[in-house]
Amino acid sequence: MLALFETIMKTETTKFAYVDMLRGIAILMVVMVHAAQRVPNLYWLADNLAQYGQMGVQLFFVASAYTLCLSFSKSTGSPLRVISFYIRRFFRIAPLYYIGITIYFILNVAINFYHLGSVAPIYPYTFTNVFANVFFIHGLFPQANNNIVPGGWSIGTEMLFYLAFPALFMGISK
């Protein structure tokens, strides 16, 4: 069983400097837009330029999709290709996201306790919202999207893309 798990988790990656550069630019764009949102009375030109930073997430998604296509095409013929794809993606994203859900829950409980003096039911942490976030379908439920983990909408979008990716790739490849 351990050998099967090691085979699934084994990744041979080729690093492309231009893809890493695009990811770095994407990250800087996201940081730029969020930093500009926190600066009051920002000069109009700087504010307008900073707003282009919102396209950083899309740039990151495109760069990631490109590398996914490269790596998925290398695994052609592997009997565990799709299963190993899903397992790698899950373990790359889910553990840290689940930690985020827990940390933000604890912070919300502490903040509510500080402001209200008691641990009252916390609005966004309904069963449906938490369930949708745990299973990465919160992008399909407006009330569950982006309120359990701030910025978590991008993780939900990414996981839904990963769900469809093997079928899309194989369909387009034919």
Image: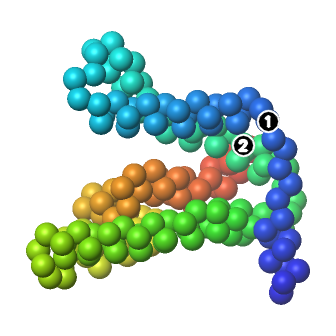
> How many C-alpha atoms fall within 10 Å of the one at disc 1: few (<14), some, or many (≥20)?
few
Colour convention of the picture:
rainbow
Identify the amino acid type marked 2.
Thr
Residue at the spot of label 1: 16
User: Does 17 sit above or below residue 85?
Assistant: above
Picture residue at 84% right of the left edge, 79% below the top: 4
Q: Residue at x 83, y 87 (%)?
A: 1
Check disc 2 and report its element: helix, strand or loop: helix
- Residue 11 spot, x, y in % from top left: 82, 59
Disc 1 is placed on an element classified as loop
Query: Which residue is label 2 attached to?
Result: 67
The residue depicted at 41 percent of the width and 56 percent of the height is 152
- Residue 44: x and y in percent read 27, 15
Q: Earlier in the sequence, mark 2 or mark 1?
A: 1
Q: Is residue 100 above or below residue 44?
A: below
Circle 2/circle 1 CB separation < 8 Å = yes
Neighbourhood count class around disc 2 (C-alpha, 10 Å): few under 14, some 14–19, many 20 upward: some
